Each structure stands twice: as structure tokens, then as C-alpha cells.
Image (tube, rainbow, N blue to C red):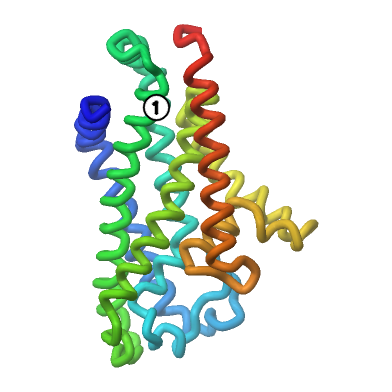
Amino acid sequence: MSGIVRSELTRCRRASFRVGWLGVTALFTVLMTVFVFSAPAHGLSGNTQGPAGVFPTATQLAGSHGMVTTLATASTFLGVVTLSFWAISAASDYTSGLIRVIVQAEPRRMRLLAGKVAALAVWTAAATTVAVAASCLSAIGMATTSGISMSHWWTGIAATIAGAWIDTYLALLVWGVIGLVIAVLTKSSTLAIAGGVAYVLIVESVFKLVASGLSHWLPGSVLTALASGGSADVTYASAVVLGAAYAAAGLAAATIAFSRRDIVE
């Protein structure tokens, strides 16, 4: 099992994958931080709906969690990035034909899938660390230029950052599993990425319009609540349970498909 994980980790170290994932994660986080900290000055906070709900006010940005507020706001974007790279990793085995070689070397397919998930979970931890670092550093810079007080940020800062890291990581893990499942089922990273983006931008938005009471329990809303430490509609405990349920269901579907499907079909 450890050999499978090491092999997957090595394959993920190629520059296009490593720099792409971590670089895009940092870029999105910094851009969202700039936008969030600039929003109060342009009247876009307090009552303006954003990707993770209402944009924080200047008072909230100056609160004890102000340094990591961006992570919750950017969680959907970071989730789509994570979904994309998990999907690329899974689908590239099929498009390159490498899957035949891998299965011949290790015919126990459940171990292969578990090894890939473990390796991608490690890379997701790295991406989460990059996002947290980018959020903290860019928040300090934006607070200085925007006149946001940072006096409350330093109280319990270690616990605040650790909590934000854990919440973001858990949310991104589920996003990644969703991308993996779609890629395994379709053998296409394009379909997985397009499906994930379309779901976030269209499907859940439509549900919010026609069935607002049910939309809170859909994956996007649940994972946003998880990354935010809970929301007005979904408690943190509920978000953790539902997120775990979505991940478990997705992994079960991927395992069944990967274990039973003819690998050369």
C-alpha cells in the first residue's frame, strides 16, 4: 500500500500538476482577499451576496477571524480547483493508457484507488497550507492599505489559523472526491471539470430559486458551511456529517465502478 501511495505522490510531483494546483490555489486566494478587503469601501459588504454567502463587513474583517475570513469566501472557487486536479489525476490514467500497466502491476484495484486517494489527500493538505498562507499574508497587506484594524487578529491566532486550516481541508477533500468520482465514472477530466463548474454556477443557483429550503443541504452549500465553520442554515456539526456522507457515497460509487468495470472498454 505504501508503495502505491509513493508512486502516486511521485507522479503528482510533475511541474504542470504541482505548480498548476498550488499556483492557482494561491492566485485565487490572493485575488479573493483583495476583493473581500476592498468590498466595504465600495458598499459591497453586509448585504451583498457572494460565493460563500454575504460578504463580510469591515467590522467582521477587523474581528478575531479577519485574517482567515477569505478562506470561507473563496472556498467554492478553491473547491472547484481541487475537484479539477483530482479529476485530472484520475482521468489521465485512462487517457494515457497507463491504467492498463498499473492494473497489471497491482491487480487489487481497491488498493490502487485507495492509494490514489491517499496521495491526493496529501497534495490537498499542501494546497490547503498554501491557501491559508496566502490568505494570512495578503490579508495583512490589504488590512494595512484598507485601514482595517488588526488589533484583534493576534488573540488566539494559532488556534484561529489551525481551525481555518482544518475546516478548509475537510471541505476541499470532499470537493476532490467529487472530482475523482466523476472522472472515474466518465474517464474524462473535461467532463468532470465542466460538470463541477456547471453544478456550482447553475444547478445549485437554480435550486436556491425554486427550492430554497432544500438548497441548504446540497453539496455546494454544505461544503461552504463546512469551510466557514457553520452557517445560519447549516450548523458545523451537520456540515461535517453531511460532508462525510457525500464523500463516503462518492468513494463507494467510484470503488464499485473501478473494481468491476472492464479496464480496456
Q: Position of residue 64 (x, y in %)?
A: 37, 84
Instruction: Say whether residue 242 is left or right of residue 29.
Output: right
Q: Outermost residue, right direction? A: 210
Q: Identify residue for label 1.
A: 113
Q: Position of residue 61 (x, y in %)?
A: 41, 83
Q: Is residue 144 visible?
A: no
Q: Is residue 4 visible?
A: yes
Q: Position of residue 49 (x, y in %)?
A: 60, 71
The quadrant where residue 107 appears: top left
User: Considering the image in quadrants, where does the N terminus appear?
Assistant: top left
- 232 above or below 150? above
> Residue sitting at 50 percent across and 34 percent down?
251
Residue 78 vs residue 44, the one in the foreground = 78
The quadrant where residue 104 appears: top left
> Residue sitting at 59 percent across and 44 percent down?
198
Instruction: Say whether residue 123 is left or right of residue 192.
Output: left
**Numbered label tally:** 1
Mark 1 residue crowding within 10 angstroms, few (<14) / some (14–19) / many (20+):
many
Q: Amino acid at mark 1?
A: Leu
- 171 above or below 190? below
Q: Position of residue 60 (x, y in %)?
A: 45, 85
> Residue sitting at 54 percent across and 64 percent down?
237
> Residue sitting at 50 percent across and 61 percent down?
226
**Is label 1 in a helix, a strand or a loop?**
helix
